[in-house]
Image (cartoon, rainbow, N blue to C red):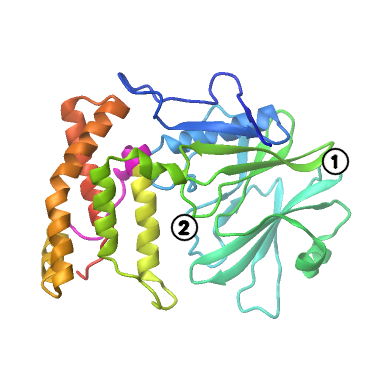
Amino acid sequence: MRRIFLLSAFIIFFPQLSNASQDSLPKLKIIDNNIDRDLCGDAFKIAQAQFFSNNFFIYRITDFPNALESSPILIASGDDISGGNALKEKSYILEKISKNNKDSNYPRSIYWQKEPTHNLRFVVDENAFGWRGDQYTLFVIDSSIRPSEFISNTKKDFTPIVEDSWNPPQLMYQKNSGRIWAFSVGEPYVILSDWDIYSINTDGAKKRCSIAFQPNAKNIASLLPTSVKNLAKFLDETLGRGKNEGTLHPTTRIRLDVMHTWANVALRPWSLSNRVAYNSREQVDQELKKWSHKAKSFNQLYRSIYKLYPKAENDLASYYKREFGKSDEEAKVLAKEVLDKAFRMHFVFSK
């Protein structure tokens, strides 16, 4: 059984919101496996900064807090559409080595820890996968292994710590001790995924802790008012099944973005401020009205959406007032902006 480890005063963190109900506000927790206080503390600070940032996805890290004992040495530079250059490494600690695979039209690289730690080293293996970008696998290997040996035997002889992840593991350097550690932010298709922290020590390479975003994805829906949940259900029905749509899977991609959207509506409404919906509200209203004339069931669903929408907006305002300590006016403005954005995120109409 995993133990909940409370690290000083900041492990369970509540934003500074007046008159807010602390029973339902979002919390972050460190879950102890083989605890490393310094590294897990730094990882928590990064996760906390991400949670309260304006980043729509918490796994997409754009800035690191200043008050860290560690600094990044391998990070993703943004969306992975670079064709092999999505990661940026600190070359004085990590060496980027091309795999020069003659059997592949898309050669990629490994990122090699130059100086081993306790006779072990981290290696990140980068593999071309498809139009969506590369996948990444994190290894810890014996220091006696040479790069050429690793490249030629990756799948056969080495056991990964993180395997074939769409989001690359991040490598960090602890300034005082010189230790290198890694953390995985989970997959983009997992809403508010746990983060796992790994390090090499005298006891070998192990997962030291996990950071859990609470409430977790399974409980997010229970937070929102019933009218908002029902509106979300109606909007999802307009998308159809979305099966057999080929390589791009447009409906699946929309649904995934929408899942992240509703999680942010419930827990991180500020993060929708910089999220851009493809269509304006006027365009969505016009196209939905045209769509409603195509079938009786479409018209019924259209009427249900627009009938419920005002109540959902009012109930969401009450939710923000109660849970985030907003004034009446602040809650109304926030609910209006957030629900409009969530509404439009369901659709991509041709311009």
**Residue 223 percent coordinates (x, y):** 35, 38
- Identity of the residue drawn at 53% across and 54% down: 187
Disc number for residue 199: none
Looking at the image, residue 259 sits to the left or right of residue 111; the answer is left
Say if 323 sits above or below 222 in the image. Answer: above
Residue depicted at x 23% and y 38%: 316
Find disc 2 in the rendering and name its residue: 79
Q: Position of residue 83 (x, y in %)?
A: 53, 68
Q: Quadrant of residue 103?
A: bottom right
Dot 1 crowding, Cα within 10 Å, few <14, some 14–19, many 20+:
some
Give the residue at the far right of this rendering.
Answer: 144
Q: On the rendered image, what quadrant is the N terminus found in?
A: top right
Q: Secondary structure at mark 1?
A: loop
Near-viewer residue (351 or 223): 223
Res 118 label = 1
Q: Where is residue 292 drawn, in percent x and y? A: 13, 68
Nearer to me, 290 or 64: 290
